[in-house]
Structure formats: structure tokens, C-alpha cells
Amino acid sequence: MKSKREQIQALLQGRQRPLVMAHRGNSEDCPENTLAAFRRAIDEGADVIETDLNVSADGELMCIHDPTIDRTTDGSGAVSEMTVAQLQSYSASYGRAGFEAERIPTLREFLEIVPPHIAIGLELKSDAFLEQRVCERLLQLLYEAEAADRAFVLSFSRERLEAVRRYAPELGTGLITLFRLLPDSGGEFTGPLWPALFANPFYVMIAHRRGQLVCPLDPTPEPRLWYYRLIGCDAVLSNNPAKTLRALGRSDGK
């Protein structure tokens, strides 16, 4: 297992900055957090695929943003109160024609389709990740998929990230923030809501001095790409990787 610093260097090696991180896959053209969305983002040349993790009643890690399935499926109920079989009995098409067969993927299913040259961002959406067994399960799945060296975890919750550092210290971590004008002192990554970078143009410089990578929370970044490149952002979030890559002059995904 590489050190966290080695993981960061490997993530950036041979790639043009900013990297493009597919937000819930290509969530503009496909239903978010589905295998269809992830495959579309992979085909379009995204450098990083990001997904959200909640935990089912039977302890499986599921790729879904909300604590309930109401918004993104044709069912209803809390993820934490349903088994994998129950969760996957509903369509995750988000009401979009042509995607009726999509289901809420498990993390294992997600990892099976992400090729080894693409990095993985996992946003922890549940306090279940405060538990040792859940963090260890996450790490186990990443090791089984030979993806631990290229995966990192993100969260709005400092407590969840502290639990990961305690129980799965091999993984890089990053705090997502809405109102901070300075990067958090912990973790290898930082994800500020994008206006913070305009309010404090030295944000990226400070983060880089701490050895941190910066990716603004801005899933439609095209109007601001000029600024993110100017101040040296390491990655940008995108609902539509193909569109963002074209705007960066990287339409071939290289």
C-alpha cells in the first residue's frame, strides 16, 4: 500500500490539471449514481469518478446520495431500513425514459466497472461510517477490488472523516465545506464551495503548502474554469465530463 503522499503523486502523474471528477457519474445525461452514469463518465474520459455512499439494513454499501430512495427511484423508504434486495427491486431511472432497468448499485458493483487508470472519490453520506465495522468493510471492498491506492473519501462531516482516519488510515480524506475561507488543516484533499476561492484567491496556495489537493464544490464549472486554472486547482467537479473536458481543450479525454 502506497503512502498517502505517494497516492497523491500517483493520482496526478501524467495527467493535465485540473483533473475532471465526474459528479455522481455523468449525472446530466444519465440518472445520477447509476452504472449507466458511471459508464458514460468513464467513456467520456473522466479522470475521477465520484459517488455517494449510504449503508443498507444488511450492511451493504450502496451508491446513493440521499438517506431515502424517494427522489431517485420509483420506490420510497430509508436506505438504512431496507436490504440490498429491497433497494434493488426499484428502478433508479429517476423518471428518465430508457433507463428503467437501472438499479441502485452496490459499491462492489461500482468498483467492478471502474478501470484501474481512473481514481475514485467516495462521499460518505451516513453516520454509519462512524462505526469501525463499516469503515473496515469499506476498506475491505477497496482492497478486494485492488482500488485502495486510487480511492479517497470525502464528507461534509468531520466526525466521519475522523472515523475513517482511525479505522482505515490507509485512505486519503478530504473535508467538503460550505462557508470556510481557509482550507481545513486535516486530510489530503479539500472541497470548498466555489465562492470561497473568489473570496480568498490564496486558498489554493495555502492548501498546496500543506500538501493538499483542491477541488471546488461546483458541478457546473465551465463559466469559472479560467479562474480555477489561474489559481491552480487540482481538480474540478462535473455533472457532464464531456462538456468540461471540451471546455478544457481535452475533448479526447487525455
Image: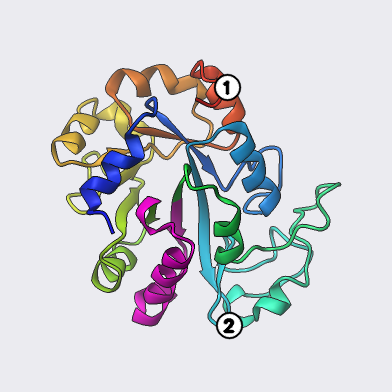
- Asked if residue 33 is positioned above or below residue 26 in the image, the reply reads below
> Front-most of 197 and 173?
173
- Asked if residue 101 is positioned above or below residue 128 in the image, the reply reads above
Q: Which of marks 2 and 1 is in front?
A: 1
- Asked if residue 195 is positioned above or below residue 132 in the image, the reply reads above
Amino acid type at image mark 2: Ala
Could you tell me which residue is drawn at 39 percent across and 25 percent down? Answer: 16
* Furthest-right residue in this view: 97
Provide the residue designation for mark 1.
Answer: 252
Q: In this view, does 168 lie to the left or right of 208?
A: right
Q: Quadrant of residue 25?
A: top right
Secondary structure at numbered mark 2: loop
Provide the residue designation for mark 2.
Answer: 57
Q: In this view, does 187 lie to the left or right of 87?
A: left
Chief secondary structure of the magenta span? helix
Q: In this view, does 31 lie to the left or right of 59?
A: right
> Front-most of 254 and 50?
254
Query: Magenta includes 118?
Result: no
Q: Are marks 2 and 1 in contact (CB under 8 Å)?
A: no
Q: Quadrant of residue 212?
A: top left
- The answer for how far apart the CA atoms under marks 2 and 1 are is 42 Å
Question: Which region of the structure is painted magenta?
Answer: 121-150
Amino acid type at image mark 1: Asp
Secondary structure at numbered mark 1: loop
Q: In this view, does 51 lie to the left or right of 139?
A: right
Question: Which of disc 1 and disc 2 is earlier in sequence?
Answer: 2
Crowding around mark 2 (Cα neighbors within 10 Å: few <14, some 14 to 19, many 20+) is: some
Counting every numbered tag in the picture gives 2
* Furthest-left residue in this view: 209
Query: Magenta includes 122?
Result: yes
